[in-house]
Amino acid sequence: MGRLVVVSNRVPAPRDRLQPAGGLAVALRAALKEGSCLWFGWSGQQVSEKEGHDPEVSLDKVENVTYATIDLTHAEYDGFYQKYSNGILWPLCHYRAGLMDYDRKDRVIYQNVNELFARKLLPLLQPGDQIWIHDYHLFPLGQALRDLGVTAPIGFFLHIPFPPWSLMRALPEADALLRAMQAYDVIGLQTEDDARNMNDGFSIVGVKARAEVFPIGIDPDSFAKQAEEGLSNPDVQRLKESLRGKPFIIGVDRLDYSKGLPERLKGYEIFLERYPEHRGKVVYLQVTPVSRGNVPEYRALRRELDEAAGRINGTYGDFDWTPIRYLTHPVPRALLASFYRLADAALVTPLRDGMNLVAKEYVAAQDKANPGVLILSHFAGAAPDMEAALMVNPHDADDIADALHKALTMPDGERRARWDHLEPDVWRVTALTWARDFIQALGKARLA
Ligand code: ADQ
């Protein structure tokens, strides 16, 4: 079997290469174990502009994986990553066209960086390679590689939602973007809705390409083990002692407007207002590390959340009780897993989300004899397979408030029955099945 060549915007930092810390690295770990692999992408470093910038590829081999990275200039980082990827494509794909900050010059930088990736990857390719490109930063990379004569099988997986064409066409170059997708042998999306939206787009612009569904999952066995074993960790004990037997609610999200955080805090505020019996008697921990802090919408969101958490704590708090423990820094994954296990309820209420792995992690972390309740948005990609959760409309704060009350007063039998329904899917669709199915499809596509 030839090599698997993975291309993503970010490549795991050297310190995470032996023990992947999260996201894509964890999901791909199983796939990368087999055979020899190349992982290509941005180093995470920005360098000053020089005439005719031509970055060197830096290579680092760890076990069977060679990591190949390039630096970007400040201007490339700004136009390609901050502005076009995160300021235009991200909001649009999350159905928030109104938040797009569109400027043609960023589109040019985005295209140029994709072409730069293609030029730098080309000399590293070998006969027999299969190339797997990840996410919205790199939509046109397949076409850029084909333009350089690459004939290897190339697949593309989109981790985030894909909107209906009526929305997508708000992007002036939506047509060109879809046309460029013809370069791919396999196109994978998270859900049926996303695949249908993309396929509708293809047929409207007259493109012969086909999106299919490859839902992503987690590594449930190792997560469950981590959750259980971590209970003896002194920091987990410290959290447990601080709860003093009170029901514990958890929320874990990157600070992002797709995650429905202001709406969630409003739901919690209404919960305290309408169900006063819970005041002083619950603990809510919201872990929300700041991400993309240089994009204006994210700065505004941070202010809005700081204000809401402060208002709720000021209004409902007491000298011996804080309604929300609100953290804007990350918590190590090993601790998080056990925090989930301690939690009686988890709030996963995105306005729109590709999949949402936190929902699956929460289920995997539970003690099956005494599981907590997952409160889940209809608009998470995970929703169709997790309908035994307490499903909510994240725009409706009263719905969130009612779900919280229901979760905290739910009879044991119902909690267990709901978890029993959720568990099989979390173990059936995993990171491993996702990677294996996609790579198999890529292998077959070329034979067809
Ligand atoms: P994300 O938007 O990052 O990913 P999600 O899938 O929920 O969203 O989380 C990714 C990982 O980060 C999870 O493993 C989670 O535990 C971890 N994480 C989140 N918040 C954390 C925190 N506060 N501290 C520590 N770790 C934290 C994108 C898409 C998703 C899609 C994934 C995978 O937006 O919809 O599910 O890719 O395809």
Image (spheres, rainbow, N blue to C red):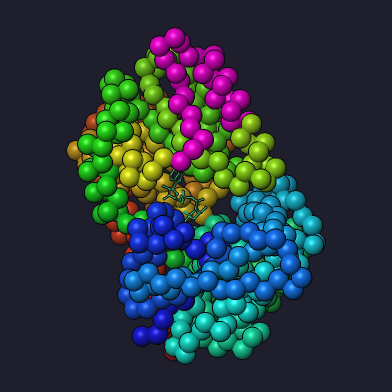
Q: Quadrant of residue 53?
A: bottom right
Q: Is residue 94 left or right of residue 128?
A: right
Residue drawn 57% across the image and 82% down it: 122
| Depth order, front residue of 281/273 | 281
* As drawn, 308 above or below 336: above
| Depth order, front residue of 238/363 | 238
Q: Position of residue 368 (x, y in %)?
A: 22, 41
- Magenta range is 304-330
* As drawn, 298 above or below 177: above
Q: Which residue, as the protein is rendered here, is positioned at the far left?
A: 369
Q: Quadrant of residue 9?
A: bottom right
Q: Is residue 341 left or right of residue 280?
A: left
Q: Is residue 142 left or right of residue 169?
A: left
| Depth order, front residue of 336/332 | 332
Q: Which residue, as the protein is rendered here, is positioned at the far top?
A: 319
Q: Is residue 329 magenta?
A: yes
Residue drawn 30% across the image and 28% down it: 238
